Amino acid sequence: MGIVEEAHNVRVLGSGDKFIVLAHGFGTDQSVWKHFVPHLLDDYRVILYDNMGAGTTNPDYFDFERYSSLEGYAYDLIAILEEFSVHSCIFVGHSVSAMIGAVASIARPDLFSKLIMLSASPRYLNDVNYYGGFEQEDLDQLFDAMSANYKAWCSGFAPLAVGGDMDSVAVQEFSRTLFNMRPDIALIVSRTIFQSDMRQILGHVTVPCHILQSMKDMAVPVMVSEYLHQNLGGISIVEVMATDGHLPQLSSPDVVIPVLLKHIQHDIVV
C-alpha cells in the first residue's frame, strides 16, 4: 500500500471501464456516499477517499500550511489519480470537494471527463454584486463557537447543515463524522473553506460541469449555482433538486441518487 493510498484511506470498488471518483465535503468522510455507492458498482470502478483532516485520517499527516488553501487538497486528488493509474474519470465532488475538483481540473484537465458539483460554492462570503450567504460577522461567530466548545458546536451545526428533523439518522451521522475531527484541525479546515474565494479561477475550468443544488441549503443559496453556471469556462448545466440541506446525498438519497445517476450517464447536449 502506497503512502497516498494509506493516508487517504483510498478504496477502489466495482467493475467497469470507467472510473468514478467520489469526494466528500467538510465534516464528513467517504461514508457520506454509502447510499449511492451500491448503485455504481456493476457499471463503474469507484474510487472513494478521505480528505486530509477528516476524522478517519491520521492527524499527524495534516500539514497546516499545505491545507491552508484548496490547492493542497487538489494536489492530493491528482496524486491519488496518478497512483491508481486513472487516465480519465467522472469526478463527483460534494461541497468544498467540488471546488477542489475544479482546481485539479485546471492543472490536469486530461484527468477529468466531467465534474459533478453537489452543493458547491466558489465563495461563502457576501460581496459587492455577489450573494454567498454569509457576512464576516457570521463566520467569526461560527469560528468562536468552534473554539469555545467544539462538541457543543457540532451538536448545533449538524441539524442546521443537514436540515429537516433534528433527530434524523442523517443528522446523527453528520454529527458523528463532524465530532470525529480533531477540533484544532476542524477549525483550520473550516476557516480555509469559508474564507476561500475561488471566483477568479472559474473561467479557467474547461471540463464540463454538472451543478446540482438543494432548493434549500443554509450554506449555499440557490443563486450560487446560477453564478457558477454563468462563470465557468466550459459548458455547464444546473439542476436544483427538491431537497433540503447541504448533504442531500445523506438526507434525501431517494431524490438525489436518480439525479446523480442521470448526470453521470448523460453528457451535456450543446
Image (cartoon, rainbow, N blue to C red):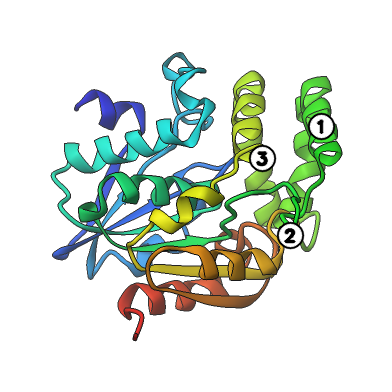
Q: Do the residues labelled 1 and 3 touch (CB within 8 Å)?
A: no
Residue positioned most to the front: 128
Q: Nearer the viewer, mark 2 or mark 1?
A: 2
Residue density around tag 1, few if under 14, some if 14–19, many if 20 or more, within 10 Å: few
Q: Name the residue under label 1.
A: 140
Rounded to the nearest angstrom, the CA distance separating label 2 from label 1 is 22 Å
Query: Viewer-proximal residue, 258 or 52?
Result: 52
Q: Residue 150 in the image: state x and y as whole percent.
A: 76, 26
Q: Does residue 142 appear left or right of residue 183 in this picture?
A: right
Which quadrant holds the N terminus?
top left
Secondary structure at numbered mark 2: loop
Residue 24 visible to the viewer = no
Closer to the chain start, of discs 3 and 2, is 2
The answer to whether 123 appears left or right of 64 in the picture is: right
Identify the residue at image location x=36%, y=80%.
268
The residue indicated by pointer 2 is 129
Q: Is residue 150 above or below residue 218?
A: above
Q: Name the residue under label 3.
A: 194
Q: Residue at x 61, y 76 (%)?
A: 241
Q: How far apart are marks 1 and 3 (CA)?
A: 10 Å
